[in-house]
Image: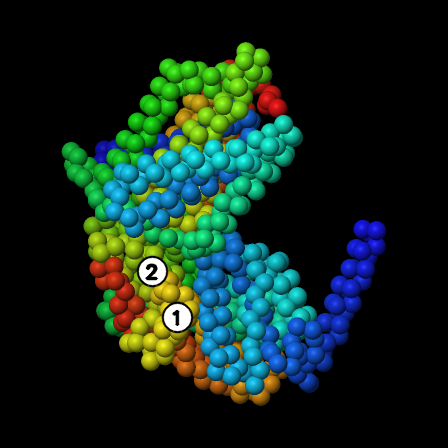
Amino acid sequence: MDGVLQFILNSLSLGSVYALFALGLIMVFGILKLVNFAYGELIMVAGYTWFVLQGTLLPLVVVVLVAIVVAAFTSVVTERVAFRPVRSNSMNAMLITSFAVSTLLQNSALVFVSPRARAVDVPVFFHTNINLGGVQISVSNVVVILVSTLTLIGLLVLMQKTRLGITLRAAADDFRMLQLLGVRADQVIVSAFAISGVLAGIAGFLWISRIGSVSPTVGMAPLLIALIAIVVGGMNSLSGAIVGGFFLGTLTIALQLLLPQDMLAFRDAVIFAVVILVLVFRPQGIVKGRFATERIG
Amino acid sequence: MKKKVLGVATVALLAMGLTACGANPAADPAPAPDATAAGSDSEIVIGASLCLTGIQSPLDEPILRGAQLAVDEINTNGGVLGKQLKLVNLDGKSDPVVVGNNGEQLTAQGAAAIITPADFDFGGPASRAAQAAGIVGISPGASSPLFGAATLGDKQFTLSMWNTTMGAAAAEWAYNERGLKKAYVVTDSFIDYTTSLSEYFIESMEHQGGTIVGQDTYTQGDQNFSAQLQRLKTAGSDADVIFVSSYMPDLGLIIRDIRAAGIDTPIFGGDSYDDPELAKVLGAEFGNDITYATHAYLSEEASALVPDFLSLYEKAHGEEPDTALVANGYDTVNVLAQAMEAAGSTDGAAVAAKMTSMKFELLTGNLTWSAETGNEPQKEAVLVSLDKGEPKFNGWLMPQWVPAA
């Protein structure tokens, strides 16, 4: 019983971070059909903001909020400076641009801070355990689950109840139609990048508080996770990203526990095999979107 | 027009390549490197292909800082053989092919020796280029036993102790000095360094008479130690010592999770622990009873050479070194300078012969290379432990018994 509860908590905690990663990536993908390979670097930017600000006397909450804002700002700036000029060109131009932005940001961290990992001050209580009905629960798991749940609810309200959310969802379904109705493409796309940046900032805080340090390549794993999660979850809907994230998180934890010792080295291979199996039977991903339209120009 | 330019460039490149090749056989009898364009009568070029970008850069970038510091110091004191040293680094970009090409380019430009990245996979190609050109190649930190004469050639060296020595030093210290006889070993299976270090630790521990009560693996980048922790709690409950062979950033997470779970068994490891960021990640709360075998300890208790080095470094950079790897870079240049001075020339064979016959007193310990065992470094390890998040010097150790590579 103890083990089962522990398993559920670990899966929820990892899955919810993965879901946030995937949501941030799909925000932009839904509208531009662009896999933004610079997405991982937004997480890195959030981490370095935390690193830079930790010397100041600002309380952690403020530092984290600033980090999220900086990540969102970076996301918007990359859209304005790098992606918008090539948006009407080929898909390949966008893809290459996203690689360029990723390399640029990564190398900036390398040159201006250090290629070596830098420690961030994670409060000690994050890593303590609390006893809840005989079960040891780490505070960081609770924080992760709480923060991601709140974020998911916030995003849900935004997407369902506000004008911006409705516009974004409409844009993901049929951008051309939206333009014909007089909605400005630039504004919609900038908002998508901003939300993507906010999600990257929040997920980045949770991720980096787990690791305890930030390095120029810290965003690479989250990018890969997000990409796999949206492919397996379904690339045409937000719920697909959430399902994909939790699916991947649970699968990872389950295999880590269930695989025999000498098979553990092949855990990732098994994960990918399962992902391939899912795609064989459901090529659209677990959740099918309603529309699958061409990318806008 | 463009084609013509390309054609001319190709011919020029070919010509350069040919002259370089032509020079190689001649390099043995006579010290020839000064004849080419880059090396003039007044300077000796030391080439380096250290990686300033990519995954190897955390190791190589501080090494370059240390190497440059040594070059500047030597030049202020009159240089080597009456000439100024010039350090030319071409970014290896954490790509073995680029590192190899850099090696070719540097030897073609007349480098007298090559400093290669601190890893066998990344550093090997530059060493092969150096060997082909008949000059000394030296890695400041590659600890693979492959980094020696058998694999790379008789003029190729590493300043680091081999993993065999590192594993043996950790095991011997745990067994003899601390009386820790039952080990639980966690191995990061992501790179050769961590897997081979665990093997040598286990071999040495068993040679001492100790036992291995359990083993587990981890993969760098997982950011999740929960399943291993569950097993450690049961299978490792009667272990005296936990040997964790991993590296930053995940190393911090692993140790923190072990300590946060209330397990205070001593933890041992290798030189990847030698990173101030590890101490910071763990803090006073979790950074206790963690001991590691490494290259240098930058305090006067460890070596009388340290205070001068520190003040030199602080003058140049305005802060303390962030990692002891800086000392490896500094030592590497000093070894080359001392060997060249003793050989009275920059000729590769003569310098290599001096390197295998001299005894070097360095920041990173006393060092000799033995030509009989394939330029195996005979080197002391320094044992350092974290206590309340602060590093403490434990002592130098030359292991009595070292497993065969």
Q: Please state which amino acid type lies under the numbered disc 2.
A: Pro
Q: Position of residue B318 (x, y in %)?
A: 38, 65
* Chain of the residue on which disc 2 is drawn: B
Q: Give residue B137's mark.
A: none
Q: Quadrant of residue B361?
A: bottom left
Q: Which residue is mark 2?
A: B276
Q: Relative to residue A204, is residue B32 drawn left or right?
A: right
The total number of labels drawn is 2
Which quadrant holds residue A63?
A: top left
Which quadrant is the C terminus of chain A positioned in?
top right
* Element marked by disc 1: helix
Query: Circle 1 marks a residue in which chain?
Result: B
Of residues B290 and B323, the one drawn nearer to the viewer in this rendering: B323
- Judged left or right of residue B286, residue A167 is right
The answer to whether any part of residue A278 appears in the image is no
**Which residue bears the numbered disc 1?**
B315
Residue at 58%, 38% in the rendered image: A97
Scheme of image coloration: rainbow
Q: Position of residue B313 (x, y in %)?
A: 40, 70
